Amino acid sequence: MLTRRKEQFPNKHKKPKQKPERSLSGKELQAYRKFLAVVLPRVIEQHIKGYQIFDNIYSYESFKAKLEEKLAELLKKKENVTVLNIGAGRQHLEREIKSKLREAKIENRVKIVPIDILNSNDYSENSLSPLTVVADAIEMPFPDNKFDLVVSEMTIDILPFAALKESFRVLKPEGDIIFHFHWWSESGENAKGEIAEYIKKYSLGGGSSDEEEIKKRIEKAGFKNVKVDTQGFYDGINETLWLEVTGKKPPLKIR
């Protein structure tokens, strides 16, 4: 049985007073914990072997390009940009983005905060950098309205809806989201057994690849200007698909 370590929170971050876990029903919370107990050991094992059970390189490269495009856009409007990356894993994305920012001599203008339920050292003994925050995305230790951009590649869609509500909470008014969701085949071949049951009943994505359905789920959390696009890569033999989700938090209402 998997034993989760006590979450470590940096002193500069305060845990929210109301725990998002309380917004989960008993059955949902039980299913989520069972899902983690099944998946996390597999994630660690697959990372150590050099690959991940959910991610694909084509989605990652597309996601990275979208993030770079958004950062360039934001840096024209803002002096500094803060980014939250949910499900950072071994922080390949952070290292590659920081390398490009360093080359452009603007590294100090962008702060990327990686968050993961596991520490990067759990993935590999040779992990290059420790995670800034080890926490569950359904209970993030950040104040309201902290980040200009919240991103997640192949992670947030398999978490409970509470993770999306938390993303909305910590995002600044008029802030942006960029998510990549898994493409779930109708046969369900890419999610089986207990994982499939949890994904369909309790996850944010709900095991759906229907663009309108996903859009409604994102809008339910309060996001506006939501766009959901099916994307993919075909190498002449196999086709790899995923969903790109973008949206904005509405501006702050002035009473």
Image (cartoon, rainbow, N blue to C red):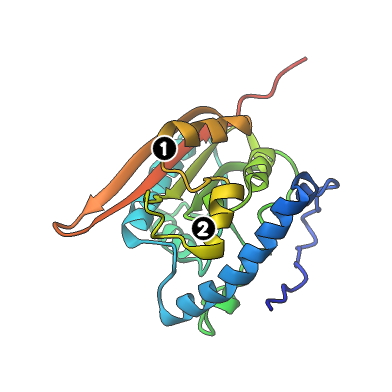
Q: Name the spot of residue 173 as percent of width and height, x first.
A: 64, 31
The C terminus lies in quadrant: top right
Q: CA distance from mark 1 to mark 2?
A: 17 Å
The N terminus lies in quadrant: bottom right
Q: Name the spot of residue 136 as percent of width and height, x first.
A: 68, 59
Q: Which residue is mark 1?
A: 210
Q: Name the spot of residue 25 as percent of width and height, x first.
A: 76, 47
In the figure, is residue 101 to the left or right of 240?
Answer: right
- The foreground one among 10 and 217 is 217
Q: Which residue is mark 2?
A: 196
Q: Residue at x 48, y 43 (%)?
A: 178
Picture mark count:
2
Q: Residue at x 39, y 57 (%)?
A: 100
Q: Residue at x 68, y 24 (%)?
A: 252
> Which element carries disc 2, helix, strand or loop?
helix
Q: Is residue 180 visible?
A: yes
**Vertical order, 11 against 76 (above or below):** below
Residue that protrudes farthest toward the bottom in the picture: 125
Q: Which mark is residue 10?
A: none
Task: For label 2, count other residues whose C-alpha is less than 10 Å away and answer few (under 14), some (14-19) or many (20+).
Answer: some
Which of discs 1 and 2 lies nearer the camera? The answer is: 2
Q: Residue at x 77, y 44 (%)?
A: 23
Residue that protrudes farthest toward the right in the picture: 17
> Which element carries disc 1, helix, strand or loop?
loop
Amino acid at pointer 1: Asp
Amino acid at pointer 2: Ala
**Vertical order, 131 against 139 (above or below):** below
**Vertical order, 134 against 167 (above or below):** below
